[in-house]
Image (spheres, rainbow, N blue to C red):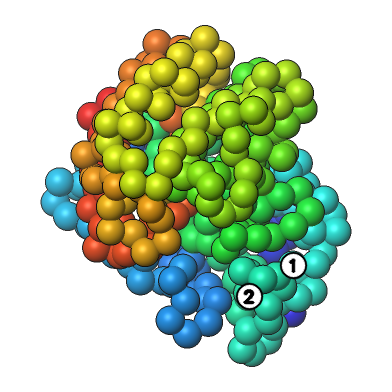
Amino acid sequence: MPGRNAAFTRRAAIAGASASLACLRARAATTSTLLVTHPAALAHDMGPAHVEGSERLRAVLRALDDARFAGLLRAEAPLASQEALLRAHSSEHLSRLATAAPANGYVRIGPDVAMNGATQEAASRAAGGAIAAVDAVMGGHAKNAFVAMRPPGHHATRHTPMGFCFFNNAAIAALHARAAHGASRVAIVDFDVHHGNGVQEIFWSDPSALYASTHQMPFYPGTGAISETGSYDNIVNAPLAKGDGGAQFREALVSRILPRLNDFSPDIVILCAGFDAHLHDPLGGLRLIADDFRDVTLRVLEIAARRCKGRVVSLLEGGYRPEDLARSVAAHVGALMEA
C-alpha cells in the first residue's frame, strides 16, 4: 500500500479534522456557507478518459473561484477515521479497499469501480470532508456547507463499492451527525439521476433516518421503485421517466419528497447533490437545467430553516459533462449562500 495511505489512521483523521475546524472557528461566521475540498480528490483516477475524471472537479472549483463566491468559507477535507467509516461499512469492506490499492497503475475491484494509488486517500477525504462539514454546520461555525470532493458515494453499500463509489459519504455524514452531535433524526435528500441504492440499503431499517430520492427509472442501478419504502416507511422514492424535465421534477418534489421531509422534522439535512439529471449529461436521460438545481436547493433550504435551523450539508455526487456540472453547481451553491 502506498505510503500516503498509511496516514489513513484515526489519529491523522482527528488531527486533520481538528485543524480544519480550528481554522473555521477563528473565522466563525454562522451566516456563511462552507466549501470543503482537497487536492487529493484530483489525483484519484479510474483509467484513461474515464467519465468520472478529475476534470469534473476542476471545472467545479474553477466556477467557485469566481468573485461571486468570494464570501464562501473554505476548508480542506481531512481523512475520515476508521470509527466513522465503520458506522456505515463493514470491516471487510474497509480491509478490501486498503489491501487492493495499487502502488502503480490501476486495479479493478468491480465492474464499474477501479482504483489507482491515490484512490484510498481521495475516498477517505471525501468521507472526511462530509464529516467536517457536519461538524461545522452542527457546531454553528457555518450556516450550511457544500463538499466538492470525489469519488462520489451514494451507490456504495455496507459491503460493496460500486457505481464509481467507494465509501458512502452521505451515510457516513448522517451517522456522524447522530454519534458526534446527538442528532436524533437525519434526512438525506438525493436528486442524482441515479438512485442511491447504497444509502437506501444502509438506512432501510432505521426509523430515525429518512432517505428521499428523485431519479430516472428504469435505470442504473435498478432500485428506487415507489414500492420500496423501508422497514419503517422511512424510504421515499419518486422515480422519473426518461425525457422528464423541470416540470415533472418539481411535481415529484412537491407531491412526494418535500412533504415527507417537512413532516419528518430532521435535525440536519444531507443532500446527495448529483447533477447528472442535466439535459446534456452523457450518463442521464432527464432534461433538467441549472435553474432546476437552484430551485430544489431553495425548496429544501426553506424546510430546513423551519425544521432544523437551516442545517444543510450538500455532497457532490454525479454530473459528467464538466461545463454543465460547473454551471449547475454554481447555481446550487449560489442558492446555499442566499439562505
Q: Name the element at disc 2.
A: strand
Q: Residue at x 47, y 85 (%)?
A: 48
In the image shown, does 75 or 224 lie closer to the viewer?
224
Q: Earlier in the sequence, mark 2 or mark 1?
A: 1
Q: Position of residue 258 (x, y in %)?
A: 43, 20
Mark 1 nearby-residue class (10 Å; few <14, some 14–19, many ≥20): some
Q: Position of residue 338 (x, y in %)?
A: 23, 29
- Which residue sits furthest bottom? 104
Which residue type does callout 1 highlight? Leu
Q: Name the element at disc 1.
A: helix
Q: Taking 87 as reference, is 339 above or below it?
A: above
Q: Residue at x 73, y 43 (%)?
A: 88
Which residue type does callout 2 highlight? Met
Label pair 2/1, CB-CB below 8 angstroms: yes
Q: Residue at x 53, y 51 (%)?
A: 219
Label at residue 97: 1
Q: Quadrant of the N terminus?
A: bottom right
Q: Taking 173 as reference, is 312 above or below it?
A: above
Q: Taking 317 as reference, is 101 above or below it?
A: below
Mark 2 nearby-residue class (10 Å; few <14, some 14–19, many ≥20): many
Residue 5 lies left or right of residue 90; in this view the side is left
Q: Residue at x 76, y 48 (%)?
A: 158
Mark 2 → mark 1, Cα distance in angstroms: 9 Å
Q: Write down the quadrant of residue 298 in the picture.
A: top left
Q: Write down the quadrant of residue 318 in the picture.
A: bottom left
Judging by the rendered image, the residue that carries numbered circle 2 is: 115
